Image (cartoon, rainbow, N blue to C red):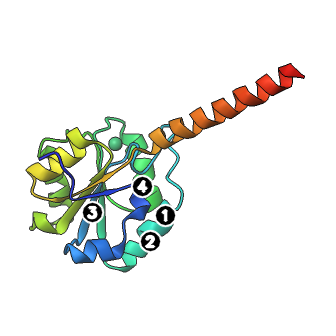
């Protein structure tokens, strides 16, 4: 129940080949830490990735647990795809809303993508959808910041030693 079908570093690593192989036609996308970082900036290359998959007839819907409508609406507008906010994952409520919105019958044709096991993966599994786990965007940022801090410290140390 808690194991994803696929695990990628970031959402833009998902290929058309991976989706076609698993007969995926629809993608439900988590927002926070999957599409946007803590400062609400979209992941690099996200728009190009969405465009490419749209051209391959993949249909999208954002499903966010966030209660901040404007935040979810903003990224949905940028990507030109529908959205459901306050989705209450891992319950079926938001997924059902999205299915209705998109007029989808078959859950097996949906891939749910998100960075959290207890909301995204568990929710997808309960709905019998294909589950793709990503690493959170901001964890990467934290790691990078840590590396940066270490470098800064080293530089400062060298500086003060002079
Ligand atoms: Mg998330």
Q: For residue 51, which numbered disc appears in the image?
A: 2
Q: Rate crowding at label 3 as few (under 14), some (14 to 19) or many (20 or more) other CA atoms within 10 Å.
A: many
Q: Rate crowding at label 2 as few (under 14), some (14 to 19) or many (20 or more) other CA atoms within 10 Å.
A: some
x 41%, y 41%: residue = 70
Q: Secondary structure at mark 1?
A: helix
Q: Are marks 2 and 1 in contact (CB under 8 Å)?
A: yes
Q: Secondary structure at mark 2?
A: helix
Q: Nearer the viewer, mark 3 or mark 4?
A: 4
Q: Quadrant of the C terminus?
A: top right
The CA distance from mark 1 to mark 3 is 15 Å
Can residue 87 be seen from the camera position used here?
A: no
Q: Looking at this view, name the residue that lies furthest to the bottom.
A: 56
Q: Are marks 1 and 3 in contact (CB under 8 Å)?
A: no
Nearest the camera: 136 or 107? 136
The residue labelled by disc 4 is 10
Q: Does label 2 point to a residue whose CB lies under 8 Å from ligand 1?
A: no
Q: In x, y percent, where is residue 61?
A: 29, 59
The CA distance from mark 3 to mark 4 is 15 Å
């Amino acid at each position: 129940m808690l194991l994803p079908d696929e695990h990628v570093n970031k959402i833009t690593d998902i290929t058309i080949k991976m989706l076609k192989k698993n007969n995926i036609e629809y993608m439900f996308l988590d927002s926070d830490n999957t599409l946007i970082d803590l400062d609400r900036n979209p992941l690099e290359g996200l728009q190009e990735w969405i465009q490419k998959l749209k051209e391959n007839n993949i249909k999208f819907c954002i499903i966010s647990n966030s209660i901040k409508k404007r935040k979810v609406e903003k990224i949905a507008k940028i990507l030109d795809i529908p959205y459901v906010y306050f989705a209450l994952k891992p319950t079926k409520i938001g997924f059902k809303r999205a299915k209705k919105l998109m007029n989808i019958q078959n859950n097996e044709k949906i891939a749910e993508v998100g960075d959290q096991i207890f909301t995204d993966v568990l929710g997808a599994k309960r709905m019998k959808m294909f589950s793709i786990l990503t690493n959170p965007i901001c964890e990467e940022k934290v790691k990078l910041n840590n590396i940066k801090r270490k470098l800064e410290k080293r530089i400062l140390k060298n500086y003060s030693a002079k």
